[in-house]
Amino acid sequence: MKGDTVIIGAGLSGLSAALSAVSSGCSVIVVSQGAGNFTSSSGYIEILGYFPTDGSSPLENPCEAISPLISENPLHPYAFLGVELIKEGVSCFTRVCEEMDLGYEGAIDRNILMPAASGALLPAAFVPRSSHKSILDCGELIVAGIVELMDFYPHLVSSNLSRAFGRDVKPLYVSLGLNTRRALSSFDIASTLEKGQTVAKLIKELKGNVNKGSALLMPAVLGKRSGAGLTCHIEQELECRVLEIPTLPPAMTGFRLGEALREYLLKIGVEFITGGSVVCASIDSRRCREIQVKSSGGRSLSVRGESFVLATGGILGGGLEVCANGIRETVFGLPASFEGKNPSHDFFCLCGHPLTSSGVKVNENLQPVREGEILIENLHVAGSTLYGYDPYLEKSGSGVAISTGYAAGLRGGKNG
Amino acid sequence: MQSILEFSLILSQEDRLAHGELPVVVIGGGVTGTGVVRDLALRGIPCVLIEQGDLATGTSGRNHGLLHSGARYAVRDAQSAAECLSENRILKEIAPRCIEDTGGVFIALKNDDKIYMDQWLSACENVGIPADELSPRELRREVPLLTSHIDRAWSVPDAAIDGFLLARANAISAEKAGARVKTYTRAVSFQIENRKVTGIHLRNLLNGREELLECAFVVNASGPWAGEVSKMAGQDLPILCDRGILVAFHYRFTNRVLNRLRPPADGDIFVPHGSVTIFGTSSKTVDDPGNTGVEQDEVIELLQAGEEMIPGLCNMRIIRAFAGVRPLMQSGGTGREATREFTIIDHGSTEGVANMISLIGGKLTTFRLMAQKSVDRVAVALQNDKPCLTDEDALPDPLPVGEPSEIVCECEQVTKKMLDRAIKGRENFLLSDARRLTRLGMGPCQGSFCTFRAAGYYDEKRNLPTPHKLIIDDINERWKGEKPVLWGWQARQTELMRRVYLGLLCMERLSREET
């Protein structure tokens, strides 16, 4: 097989790279072991939530904090992009989502605080339109859990949200009347809510408990596609505002995003090879010519490309492997760096973990380097495999994925 | 079998407490301390147990969980071996719920000391430990991970025992017979009058409340802390703290205990527990009885010691590393040379304190015997002549699994009903308290999801003031054991936990303050 741009990894950074590579006129192949880690994602676009990471409040204006971030941390992925390229990447992304009926609202210079399933508040710059609404001006704030749904606890949410908002938040449970022997996941409930009669039951249960003009916070189970349709329906029936809260995995908020992007890319002619691992790469004169992909069944496929994007998801995605005495980049064997191996005894410490910010060092073109020397010219790295940032403390995961993916796909297109 | 007996004991104990008869206070809620208080209560002696943490949070919860057949000690310590064998049989009779009778194997590899092997065989015979030879080929079919360099192997009646369940079972039995058990209660100082301990100043570590508990006698069963406790009575104790580390592998790759047949060294023993395999151990003198942190290089050293028996051990996924501190008798050599026999120090025999004894040494396997001998001493001092019943009286089931209900922890199959039972009657609790009785979060995911679920569930039932603190404290408790083994798939697991608890739930921003 041959493509202009071959992308390794089908997560948010890989698919963002595919978008920009296609828009540069390249033929694109996406090779991946799995379907990308979308189901542990909020589905929001988080540009920058906290800087410095031990700041006591979230940033109001993420855009304004990018320059100070870059001066303090010149190896942060944003340092290789700059604000303009970040904006471009986000625009490209939101345009595609709009086409796929998953429109986003927001602005790069204003963070919105979104309720999380713990009752904490998550700062994000862009959120799906169906989640873009104010709730604090509503009459009553209610958190409704579903009896049959695992991993969502209204009392936990409401006790922390009341503290954050300084007002009462009322928890309650409703039942969908499903006769199940096990607790159901968000995916199960979202599937079930595609049936009219289950929706009717949900509304009936809520009606008794939710007054007009209330804000109703629910776990994000209102459909497997964009939550918009069902959310509006409930809002109309109950005359209230409905806001979905991203749940523990499988989070439908991330799932919907992954589905939308994949569908779009397939529509515009991107080829996907799923379920294969890259077992070796042929490099000569500092250029990658082709990679060998092996399926779990043992079949081998050779994929040739003009340029390549490494979007393998860092430690969690399998793109970086942690050994007892170091870190290994698993596809090309690129040098991977990390600062020390002594994490804090406090898992939640605001100073970060050495492993999370470990990864491959790059130059301003996202090409992998060792002491400034370019290792593979036609390879560009994107997402969590990159060195130098902590997506979980900064609240920058999707922002870095989308913008570095966009840049990697674009640069690959230019080089190829 | 025991219900009528216990009922009459309860009446007589309550009468005695009502008549102002002062209790015996047992300090330390491990298997030994709970064993002592059970024996006291069953002999009708009023008693109170105090423990600074939850039951079995000291050495009793930080070991292989091995119910020895005695074979490991047969060559160098025949007395200890004989006691192990006898207690092994007794405990299997009275505490089946706390024991999985896995059986064990002693494996001699081709380069191992043949002289020791011969000594071992005759020593086992002398002590009476049944050792039946096995075919190495059959053994390897049963445990495919074993090396092909096995010379000979024998099966012995080792078993896996759960220290948490055992301590709790002892405590329940003691309480049924009229004892009081106070956890999260620390002895702060002693009140001494005329060379006797007449009272102990206690502090409740959960609510800060202090009280003076008057007592007739003190049994110091606080394990590695025994030296600190005896100092409160102005007494020195010849105790040596010896730390050993252990690791848990992410799956159960053997159904029998595996022992190396050679002079005891590091990394000799593998014990199956629940869904994992525990491997250890090492030996190092330490100053601090609470020194239970583990460094990564110690883990690597331990794994290398086990490579000979299980090739490829160093590359296997480890979910946790932990350590326990052995309270050894100082004069008996250090480390592996130190005797494993137990010693009862009577502080009245020197110019010390007349009504206190301290317990040093011993093994989990022989706790009941150590308790019996200690209580014999106390009984003499208090002029009580009731017989010891702890070798026949069956221990209660500390946590009935009960009928099926919704699963909270998928790795270890812990249900909502089990969680309810685990904290019944407790006003304040940590998730670890439930963990010790149910194995919540002890599997490969180390609480990645079940921590959130258990906290959410408990919050729904109990309306807790700060449920998120339960989650944060518990994740940090699991993290302590994951830090030294952060590589391979376990490093990926902890990244997933960061992604969920920080990235998705933003829990690092929730206040750690109590309301």
Image: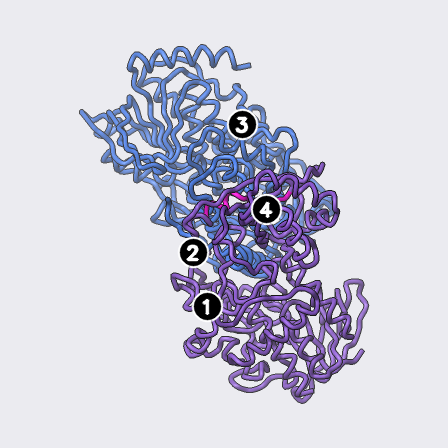
Chain letter belonging to callout 1: A
Q: Which residues are magenta?
A: A149-160
Residue at x 66%, y 84% (from the top left corner): A378
Name the residue that disc number 3 marks. Answer: B86
In front of the other: label 3 or label 4?
4
**Mark 2 residue element:** loop
B424 lies left or right of B317? left
Q: Amino acid at mark 1?
A: Gly
Q: Amino acid at mark 4?
A: Asp
In front of the other: label 2 or label 3?
2
Judging by colour alone, the chain drawn in purple in this rendered image is A
Name the residue that disc number 1 marks. Answer: A340
Residue A368 against residue B311 in the figure, above or below: below
The Cα atoms of the two marked residues, 2 and 1, are separated by 14 Å
What label sits on residue A151 in the rendered view?
4
Q: Is residue A314 magenta?
A: no
Going from N to C along the chain, the mark reached first, 4 or 1, is 4
**Mark 3 residue element:** helix
Does residue B119 appear in this view?
yes
Name the residue that disc number 2 marks. Answer: A345
**Do callouts 4 and 2 mark residues in contact (Cβ within 8 Å)?**
no
In front of the other: label 4 or label 2?
4
The Cα atoms of the two marked residues, 3 and 4, are separated by 48 Å
Residue B442 against residue B158 in the figure, above or below: below
